[in-house]
Image: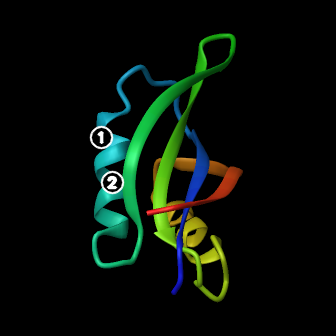
Amino acid sequence: MAGKVIAVIRVYPKELTENFEPLVSKVNNAIKNSVYELMKWEAIDIAFGYRALDLYFLMPEDIERGTEELEELIRGIDDVDNIDVVYVTRIGV
């Protein structure tokens, strides 16, 4: 039986922002017909007022390409400059 993993993806927006709600909404729209579920998000201070967004996704462990499809979905959002996979770990559900 396949398990689940939590993947933490750091999203770097194109513009300085304090309100990440619109970007989170766009991420939710991008993943709505997929196997990914956004569990949590938090803004992270980077430097000099620039903030990034850490997104915590629940996803099946047995996805063939790992986080690649998820990364592509997020990169396809206009407001996203870049992303990094910060952490992936298996969880018991």
Q: Is residue 1 above or below residue 34?
A: below
- Residue at point 63%, 70% (across, down): 67
Which percent across, then down, holds residue 70? 54, 69
Q: How many marks do you count on the picture? A: 2
Task: Tell me how far mark 2 sits from mark 1, CA to CA.
Answer: 6 Å
Residue position marked by numbered label 2 in the rendering? 26
Who is closer to the viewer here, 79 or 64?
Answer: 64
Quarter of the image with the C terminus is bottom left
Residue at 46%, 30% in the rendered image: 42
Q: Amino acid at mark 1?
A: Pro
Residue 17 rendering spot, x and y as whole percentages = 45, 24
Q: Nearer the viewer, residue 42 or 61?
A: 61
Name the residue rendered at 38%, 32% in the picture: 20
Check disc 1 and report the residue beneath it: 22
Task: Give coordinates of residue 10: x percent, y percent.
Answer: 61, 44
Q: What amino acid is found at the position of numbered circle 2 in the picture?
A: Lys
Q: Sort mark 1 into few (<14), some (14-19) or many (20+) by Cα contacts within 10 Å.
A: few
| Percent of width and height locating residue 4 | 51, 69
Whether residue 42 is situated above or below residue 7 in the rendered picture: above
> Is mark 2 in CB contact (under 8 Å) with mark 1?
yes
Under circle 2, the secondary element is: helix
